[in-house]
C-alpha cells in the first residue's frame, strides 16, 4: 500500500511486554489500508500532544435504523485524511459469540472492502465492532451484511444488543437456556433495538448461574442470573476425595458468604435455607456438590458505570422466575419497566438512577411486583417495605388460623 510512513516511537512502546498489542495489529492492518495507516499516525499525534482529536460530527446511520453506527470524525482530517471519517459499525453478535470460521471470514472480507480492516471482537456491549469507515460506504456495508443474514446491533438511547454467557451449550451449571433467551429477546424487541426511543441506553445481559461469566450484575440494566430452588446435593465420598487435596475449612466453609456450610472432618452439611446460591462451593467442588430442584433465574436491575450518579450494581427485583420460551412473563414485565422509565426518567438517566431517585418502592408498585425480603439490599436502610392495612389484616388472619391449627411458630 502506498501511504505516508509515520514515525511512531510512543505507540511502539505499547508493543513491548508479554501481552498481545493492539498497535502490532494496527500495523498489520496498515499494510493493506490507508485508513489504518492514518489511524496509527493520528494515535501517535494524540499521545505526543496529550490531546484527543475525535469530535462529535452529528448523526450517521443507515436508512430505517436509528442506531447501529457510531459517528466518528477527526479534527485532523487534513493531516490524516484516512481518519477524517472513521465511523464504528456494530454487528449484532450471535448468542454467546458462536461463529463458524466461514462466518468470520465473510464479515472480514466485507469489512476489508469498505472499512479500515480493524475490528474489536467484541465490544463491551456485546456486538462485533468494526472500526473505521466513511459515511459514503455505510449503505453498501449494511446492504452486504444484511443480504447475508447479519444485522446491526444497538447504539444510542436504545435497547443495546442483548448478550449472554455460553450457557447450556458448554456449561453444565446453566440454570436456563441463556442462548435461546438472548436470541428470543433480540427478535422480540427489534424496534427497541433499532429505533432509539428510550431516555438512555438499556442493556440486557444473561448469565446461566451466579458465576456470571458476562458480568451481567455489574454492567446491565437488566441482569438475568440463573439460580435454582432446591438443595445442594452432597456426595460425601467425593467430599472425602477433595479433603485429600484441599483445606475444606479454609477454602469452602470459611469462604461461604452466608456461613451456611459446616464440615467436621468427615461429613459436610449445608443449611440450604441460608444459601444465597452464590456458586462458590460448587465451582470449587464440582464433583461433590450439585444444585437440585426447580431451575430459573433472579432478575436484577440497574447496574451501570458512573455518569449521573456513581456506578451501581444491579439490585434484585424478582428473586425467582422460570425462564422458558416464549418468555411471556419476562417480556410483559420488561414492557412495564420501560413504561415506568419513560414516564419518570430524564434524558441520559439510566433506569438504575431513576430507581435511586424515585425509590424502589414506587418502582415496584408501578411494575406490579410485590416487595420481598430478597430485594432488601441494605437492611435497616432500604425504606421501600411498607405494609398496607390490607396486608396487616391478612397477616393477622393467617396468624389466627395458624394458632387454631397449631402451626404457629413464634
Ligand atoms: Fe454458601 Fe454460596 Fe455454597 Fe450457598 S452456594 S452454600 S452461599 S458458598
Image (tube, rainbow, N blue to C red):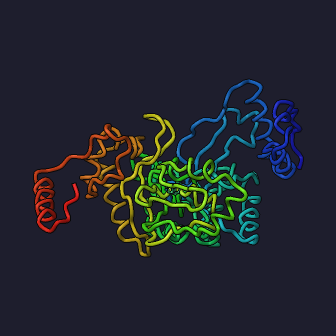
Establish if 298 lies above or below 99: above
Name the outermost residue toward the bottom. 325
- Residue 158 in view (yes/no): yes
Establish if 305 lies above or below 157: above
x and y percentages locating residue 273 in the rendered image: 40, 59
Establish if 54 lies above or below 32: above
Q: Quadrant of the C terminus?
A: bottom left
Residue displayed at 57% across by 48% down: 255
Q: Using the rendered view, name the quadrant where residue 89 is placed.
A: bottom right
- Residue 159 in view (yes/no): no
In terms of depth relative to the viewer, which is nearer, 116 or 171?
A: 171
Residue displayed at 66% across by 31% down: 52
x and y percentages locating residue 184 in the rendered image: 48, 71
Q: Using the rendered view, name the quadrant where residue 393 is placed.
A: bottom left
Establish if 374 lies above or below 55: below
x and y percentages locating residue 379 in the rendered image: 34, 41
Residue displayed at 52% across by 69% down: 233
In terms of depth relative to the viewer, which is nearer, 180 or 39?
A: 180
Residue displayed at 75% across by 43% down: 82
Q: How many tags in the picture?
A: 0
x and y percentages locating residue 27 in the rendered image: 85, 45
In terms of depth relative to the viewer, which is nearer, 310 or 172?
A: 172
Amino acid at each position: 500500500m502506498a501511504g505516508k510512513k509515520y514515525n511512531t516511537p510512543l505507540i511502539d512502546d505499547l508493543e513491548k511486554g508479554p501481552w498481545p498489542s493492539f498497535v502490532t495489529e494496527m500495523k498489520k492492518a496498515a499494510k493493506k489500508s490507508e485508513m489504518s495507516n492514518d489511524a496509527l499516525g493520528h494515535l501517535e499525534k494524540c499521545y505526543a500532544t496529550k490531546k484527543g482529536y475525535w469530535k462529535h460530527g452529528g448523526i450517521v446511520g443507515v436508512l430505517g435504523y436509528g442506531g447501529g453506527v457510531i459517528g466518528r470524525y477527526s479534527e485532523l482530517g487534513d493531516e490524516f485524511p484516512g481518519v477524517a471519517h472513521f465511523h464504528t459499525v456494530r454487528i449484532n453478535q450471535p448468542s454467546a459469540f458462536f461463529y463458524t470460521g466461514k462466518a468470520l471470514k465473510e464479515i472480514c472480507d466485507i469489512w476489508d472492502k469498505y472499512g479500515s480492516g480493524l475490528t474489536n471482537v467484541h465490544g463491551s456491549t456485546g456486538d462485533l465492532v468494526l472500526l473505521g469507515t466513511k459515511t459514503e460506504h455505510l449503505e453498501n456495508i449494511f446492504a452486504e451484511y444484511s443480504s447475508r443474514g447479519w444485522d446491526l446491533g444497538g447504539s444510542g438511547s436504545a435497547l443495546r444488543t442483548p448478550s449472554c454467557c455460553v450457557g447450556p451449550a458448554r456449561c453444565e451449571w446453566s440454570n436456563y437456556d441463556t442462548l435461546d433467551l438472548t436470541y428470543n429477546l433480540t427478535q422480540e424487541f427489534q424496534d427497541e433495538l433499532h429505533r432509539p426511543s428510550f431516555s438512555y441506553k438499556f442493556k440486557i445481559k444473561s448469565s446461566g448461574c451466579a458465576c456470571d461469566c458476562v458480568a451481567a450484575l455489574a454492567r446491565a440494566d437488566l441482569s438475568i442470573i440463573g439460580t435454582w430452588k432446591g438443595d445442594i446435593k452432597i456426595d460425601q465420598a467425593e467430599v472425602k476425595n477433595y479433603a485429600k487435596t484441599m483445606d475444606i475449612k479454609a477454602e469452602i466453609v470459611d469462604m461461604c458468604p452466608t456461613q451456611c456450610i459446616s464440615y467436621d472432618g468427615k461429613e459436610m452439611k449445608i443449611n440450604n435455607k441460608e444459601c444465597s446460591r452464590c456458586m462458590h462451593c460448587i465451582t470449587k467442588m464440582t464433583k461433590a456438590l450439585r444444585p437440585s430442584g426447580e431451575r430459573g433465574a433472579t432478575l436484577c436491575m440497574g447496574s451501570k458505570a458512573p455518569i449521573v450518579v456513581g456506578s451501581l450494581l444491579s439490585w434484585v427485583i424478582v428473586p425467582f422466575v422460570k425462564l422458558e420460551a416464549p418468555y411471556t412473563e419476562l417480556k410483559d414485565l420488561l414492557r412495564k419497566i420501560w413504561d415506568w422509565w419513560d414516564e419518570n426518567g430524564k434524558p441520559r438517566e439510566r433506569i438504575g438512577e431513576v430507581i435511586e431517585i424515585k425509590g424502589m418502592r414506587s418502582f415496584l408498585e408501578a411494575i406490579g411486583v410485590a416487595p420481598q425480603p430478597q430485594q432488601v439490599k441494605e437492611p435497616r436502610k432500604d425504606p421501600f417495605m411498607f405494609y398496607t392495612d390490607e396486608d396487616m389484616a391478612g397477616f393477622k388472619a393467617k396468624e389466627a388460623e395458624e394458632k387454631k391449627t397449631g402451626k404457629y411458630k413464634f
